[in-house]
Amino acid sequence: MVNKITDLAGYLEKYRQSVADPEGFWAEIAESYQWQKKWDKVLDWKFEGESAPDVNWFVNGKMNITENIFERNMSSRKDQVAIIWEPNDPKEPEIRLTYGELFDKVKQFANALLKLGVKKGDRVAIYLPMVPELAVAMLACARIGAIHSIVFAGFSASALADRIIDAEAKIVITSDGGFRGTKSIHLKNIVDEALANCPSVELSVVLKRTEEKVHWEEGRDVWWHEIIEGESTSNDAQAMDSEDILFILYTSGSTGKPKGVVHSTAGYMIFAEYTFKNVFQYNDGDMYWCTADIGWVTGHSYIVYGPLLTGATSIMFEGVPTWPDAGRFWDVVDKYKVTHFYTAPTAIRALIAQGDKWVVDHDLSSLKVLGTVGEPINEEAWRWYHDTIGKSRCPIVDTWWQTETGGIMISPLAGITPTKPSHATLPLPGIQPILVDPEGNELKGNSVEGILCIKFPWPGMLRTTYGDHKRCFNTYFSAFRGLYLTGDGAKRDEEGYYRIIGRIDDVINVSGHRIGTAEVEDAINQHPKVVESAVVGYPHEIKGSGIYAYVICEDLSDREMATIENEIRDTVNKFIGPIAKPDKIQIVSGLPKTRSGKIMRRILRKIGEGDASNLGDTSTLLDPGVVDEIISGAKVEVKR
Ligand code: 7RM
């Protein structure tokens, strides 16, 4: 397979070359793509100054990512399966789409979108469950140069509306509903509610999945199956500039509403494929399964784009790990003889808690490589994954990356890089990490811990935050001059391996989902009885981090006191979605504030962790009494 590293010496050599001559390194990789017009210059970049990031890869190149998935692979892979779809209910039949069949569906839907008036550069919001049409919809957008903005179908109407409004989407693609475990979620109702506040949206395309009754708005709503009827399967790909936007994906940060992370076409394409084939060491004939939802970046890069560009067979799973029972993942592994399995630590911990009996009676001998992503994997979970799932013969790739990075940045290459529990190990070729102290001084050498930054551009990096470039600069490039700030703390150990410690900002990783504490506070504050709130993460056995909310309310009667916690959870559910509901809510009379009015979250974090024995410097506290009150009423046992 082209551009694939095969041994440790090869990795070391490629890494060296990628730092010594980044342009030469990436140009050689880019040669293997189908270009309508080749680039003039490999890279133009600036990480400094208010216009930063100003990064252009493969300048003036023209291409289309779907030509590189389909046309480029068609002569050899027309009849090879591209996507296997495993439904929520194991009694329902699976769907297998070959590259040829998927290509036809993409072209047909692309033609239907064109007929609806969708043009290059238009934003298309996609709010679909994990069905094959989700992949078809995103690829059809890419085919015609429309910008997809996929919204995870677990977000609420209000969160969906925020994203549609920010992207000024012209059309929304959704379904009547979706199945997850025993639940059927009525997505069309959620979209209807969202669209009441989204003037930019002219049309919604509705796919039939659950066959539930839907409210219909004549003139706005059209059925997926009707618009593709009679539509041709020939379609010429739109010529895209290397730097034309491929997609927007919203992600949470430490302040304000989620940001629309913008990825452009050529760089993302090359990075997604290069990282996929090298990290997973995928070979022809392998069976690859990533359990993420396509609504998150992992699904974009490692269910759809990376695997399909490589010409892999990618499994798409509609269901949940614990239904009909906790053996569901291993049933699927056994059923399709999965060779590569990629999931999140939270899923691993949830399955550990169910006991090994769900694993033992399944044949997992097809497995060759295991992957993890989304949050730090604790050593116990790593060991169980390695020993009980991988039978101690499958390397684990602990892949560190972010929505903003587009693809995997620090990770072992499967079977090549010696692994170490809980360590993401070494940067991929082309990636130049650096650790700095809070003043921005580089921490050189090994055995150091600091703030993880990246000092040189890579093709898959974000280009801007949609509609607000200044916010992109402020968030990622203003803390330390000339460096991309990841928001994570990391250790470089005695062998030079990276171990990701976790977020250093007000972002928490709940079950591998990124949630901003400010967003949750904003949602809580929507409750009419709430005066103020402060949200922190705390260690949670399964989820990695749980959400702990300290809330000040107006005077509450005993009756109101009895229901307030549930009402607050419902409010968060309404404004964001179930993933952001606080696990613990403590009603307090005050919050620990400095004289200047800043909440000292450090103290709240310590209390949430159950250890108030060392609260650090509390001399700037306006009213030290509130701390004692909070400790006494804490929802955890607190060591004083
Ligand atoms: C892919 C994804 C990004 C944040 C990131 C980290 C955390 C992701 C790992 C990890 C430790 C890992 N995108 N994170 N992977 N922490 N080890 N292997 O998750 O934008 O949703 O989240 O996730 O904190 O900054 S994301």
Image (cartoon, rainbow, N blue to C red):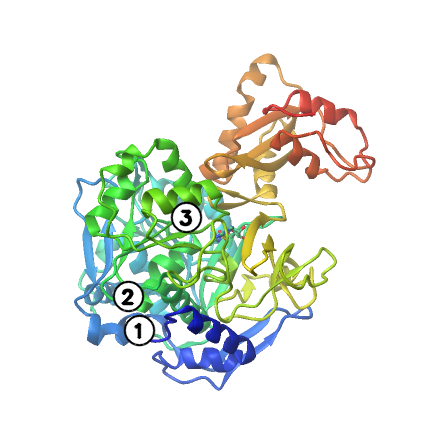
From what the image shows, is residue 349 above or below residue 264? above
The residue type indicated by label 2 comes to Asn
Which residue is at 72% across, 38% downward? 599
Q: Nearer the viewer, mark 3 or mark 1?
A: 1
Residue 213 at x, y = what percent?
A: 26, 38
From what the image shows, is residue 167 above or below residue 277? above
Q: How far apart, in angstroms, are the residues tagged by discs 2 and 3?
A: 30 Å
Q: Which mark is residue 227?
A: none
Which residue is at 24% across, 49% downward? 365
From what the image shows, is residue 336 above or below residue 542? below
67 displayed left or right of 490: left
Q: Pointer 3: residues within 10 angstroms few (<14), some, or many (20+)?
A: many
The residue type indicated by label 3 comes to Phe
> Residues at badges 3 and 1 in contact (C-beta under 8 Å)?
no
Q: How far apart, in angstroms, are the residues tagged by discs 2 and 1?
A: 8 Å
Q: How many labels sit on residues?
A: 3
The residue type indicated by label 1 comes to Met
Q: Secondary structure at mark 1?
A: loop
Point out the tag, 2 or 1, that comes first from the N-terminus.
Answer: 1
Q: Quadrant of residue 78?
A: bottom left
| Residue picked out by circle 2 | 283
Residue 6 at x, y = what percent?
A: 36, 70
> Mark 2 near ligand 1 (CB under 8 Å)?
no
Q: Which mark is residue 152?
A: 3
Residue 25 at x, y = what percent?
A: 47, 79
| Residue picked out by circle 1 | 1
From what the image shows, is residue 542 above or below residue 74? above
Q: Pointer 1: residues within 10 angstroms few (<14), some, or many (20+)?
A: few
> Residues at badges 2 and 1 in contact (C-beta under 8 Å)?
yes
> Mark 3 near ligand 1 (CB under 8 Å)?
no
Q: Secondary structure at mark 3?
A: loop
